[in-house]
Image (tube, coloured by chain):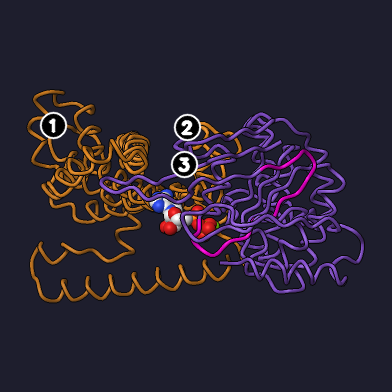
């Protein structure tokens, strides 16, 4: 579904150019999930934006087996539009002309406990609710690929875990291909069936860890979960 | 809302009292016909009501000149300002021009305008437009410069094109600033309107006030001033209502 090989991305300003990703290889099958972990500033956001088609200046191979419309990206700070109601934020993609159905969005808002807020504005939501709205907006356009940039950052432990469970369920129900970027070890271990550990900037994949039992019930409390966490921690740069 | 009304009532009463006091003082200090140069509020209001038939056509003409100019200034200023603020390349050339012309008192252009567009209302409208437009443009420009890149990414990553970025991000993000600059431009516009109505016309509140001065009809002068104030207040109320209606997200009780 996604195939990346020898990917390099640089940022060019007036005089200097800074290499942020260098010779990165990754691949991900349809319906699978990939958790990418790496230190702050290593290039995770840049990688996701490149996959989403927001960066045109890259070299190397980047193949995504779907149209750009079928890729949904949840931005690092969500990017909710303060002047739009919750409903209008959730249906932004549809209003911009992407495919999807509004009844589905209604169901999604019910599922994420946001329906009663549909006429409120983002500033009236809690941090967790904003994150859920970001998720609803991404899923409203029926994507095949869901890219998430540190989607649960700055949430309390309880909210974060319940949101992770929601994402897991949505992934299973909707047969999504999911990529999640984070610097939280337990998060990649919980949501990544494949875990890619990135090096310091310029980013490349340092190790790939398989996480076969991810998504099975009670996984978070299993021995296996802690083994994966431990293994991942050891690989961090 | 009730509280607002109460506060307006208190300020209004205080203003009337001060006015009255000033009027008594002037009456006391000056003597002869000049002593009535500052009539008390009751006299001014009763003149406004009694001479309403004569004032009304002037009020309508002034209101038309002002409203047309301001709508044009807000529309042109906001459009130019947000394009200049949002498009980096245009900004580099246009921003210096904007800041160069902004501080110049627009009255210096009046002779040029009169020669180019004649002595009629077109010239007056262009003059008021010029007085108001730069201020609106600069507010819109500054607001557009401060647009969060995240909002643009949100629209772009959902397949939005340039036009949609304007429609869903740039315009709503700058609207509060544009409307508050519209509010400021009402005051500037009325000052410009008064100047523009001093000559080459025999209708308009500016003309009415100026003419009343000439014939020593002081209470008519103040009736005209009250009519101006009413015009300004009416426009403020309209802009305020627009702000509340169009920028709901800024008026949430949290
Ligand atoms: N638009 C940009 N222009 C120039 N440099 C950038 C830009 N965005 C990010 N960078 C730089 O690229 C590096 C990686 O950034 P980012 O991809 O956001 O990392 P991460 O998401 O892993 O924290 C950082 O050093 C950052 O300063
Ligand atoms: Mg990042």
How far separated are the C-alphas under marks 1 and 3?
39 Å
The chain displayed orange equals: B
Q: Is B51 a magenta residue?
A: no
Tell whether label 3 touches label 1 (CB within 8 Å): no
Query: Do marks 2 and 1 both belong to one polypeptide chain?
Result: yes
Q: Give the mark nearer the N terminus: 2 vs 3.
A: 2
Residue A121 visible somewhere in the drawing: no
Residue at figure coordinates x 15%, y 62% from the top left: B37
Judging by the rendered image, the residue that carries numbered circle 2 is B162
Within 10 angstroms of label 1, few (less than 14), some, or many (20 or more) residues? few
The quarter of the image holding the C terminus of chain B is bottom right
Could you say whether the residue bearing mark 3 is in a helix, strand or loop? helix
Relative to residue B215, is residue B190 drawn left or right? right
Judging by the rendered image, the residue that carries numbered circle 3 is B171
The chain displayed purple equals: A
**Residue B200's mark?**
1
Counting from the top left corner in percent of width and height, residue A198 is at 58, 57
Relative to residue A184, is residue B70 drawn left or right? left
Mark 2 chain: B
Could you say whether the residue bearing mark 1 is in a helix, strand or loop? loop
Q: Is A36 a magenta residue?
A: yes
Within 10 angstroms of label 2, few (less than 14), some, or many (20 or more) residues? few
Question: What stretch of residues is rendered in magenta?
Answer: A27-42
**Residue A55's mark?**
none
Quadrant in the picture for residue B200: top left
Report whether the residue tagged 3 is closer than 8 Å to ligand 1.
no
Q: Give the mark nearer the N terminus: 1 vs 3.
A: 3
Q: Nearer the viewer, residue B204 or B7?
A: B7
């Amino acid at each position: 579904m996604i195939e990346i090989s020898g990917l390099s991305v640089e940022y060019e300003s007036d005089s200097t150019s800074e290499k942020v990703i260098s010779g990165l290889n990754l691949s991900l099958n349809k319906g699978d999930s990939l958790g990418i972990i790496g230190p702050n500033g290593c290039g995770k956001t840049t990688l996701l934006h490149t996959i989403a088609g927001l960066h045109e200046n890259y070299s190397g191979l980047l193949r995504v087996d779907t149209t750009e419309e079928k890729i949904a990206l949840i931005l690092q700070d969500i990017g909710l539009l303060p002047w739009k109601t919750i409903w209008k934020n959730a249906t932004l993609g549809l209003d911009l002309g992407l495919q999807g159905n509004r009844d589905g969005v209604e169901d999604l808002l019910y599922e994420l406990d946001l329906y009663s807020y549909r006429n409120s504005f983002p500033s009236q939501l809690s941090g967790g609710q904003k994150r859920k709205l970001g998720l609803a907006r991404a899923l409203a356009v029926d994507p095949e690929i869901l890219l998430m940039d540190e989607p649960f950052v700055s949430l309390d432990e309880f909210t974060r875990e319940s949101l992770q469970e929601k994402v897991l369920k949505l992934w299973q129900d909707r047969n999504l291909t999911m990529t999640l970027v984070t610097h939280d070890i337990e998060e990649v271990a919980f949501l990544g069936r494949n875990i890619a550990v990135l090096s310091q900037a310029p980013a490349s994949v340092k190790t790939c860890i398989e996480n076969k039992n991810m998504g099975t019930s009670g996984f978070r409390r299993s021995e296996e979960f802690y083994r994966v966490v431990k293994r991942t921690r050891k690989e961090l740069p | 809302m009730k509280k607002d009304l109460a506060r307006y009532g208190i300020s209004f009463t205080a203003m009337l009292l001060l006015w009255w006091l000033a009027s008594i003082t002037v009456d006391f200090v000056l003597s002869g016909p000049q002593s009535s140069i500052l009539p008390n509020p009751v006299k001014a209001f009763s003149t406004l009501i009694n001479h309403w038939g004569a004032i009304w056509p002037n009020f309508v003409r002034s209101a038309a000149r002002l409203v047309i100019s301001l709508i044009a200034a807000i529309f042109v200023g906001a459009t130019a300002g947000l394009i200049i603020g949002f498009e980096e390349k245009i900004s580099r050339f246009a921003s210096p021009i904007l800041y160069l012309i902004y501080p110049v008192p627009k009255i210096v252009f009046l002779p040029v305008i009169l020669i180019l567009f004649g002595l009629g209302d077109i010239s007056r409208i262009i003059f008021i437009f010029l007085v108001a437009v730069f201020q609106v443009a600069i507010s819109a420009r500054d607001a557009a410069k401060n647009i969060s890149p995240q909002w643009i990414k949100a629209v772009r990553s959902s397949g939005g094109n340039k036009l949609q970025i304007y429609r869903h991000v740039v315009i709503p993000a700058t609207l509060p600033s544009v409307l508050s600059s519209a509010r400021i431009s009402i005051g500037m516009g009325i000052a410009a309107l008064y100047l523009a109505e001093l000559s080459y016309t025999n209708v308009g509140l500016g003309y009415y006030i100026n003419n009343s001065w000439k014939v020593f009809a002081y209470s008519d002068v103040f009736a005209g001033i009250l009519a101006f104030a009413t015009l300004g207040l009416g426009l403020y109320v309209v802009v305020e209502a627009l702000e509340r209606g169009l920028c709901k997200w800024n008026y949430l009780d949290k």
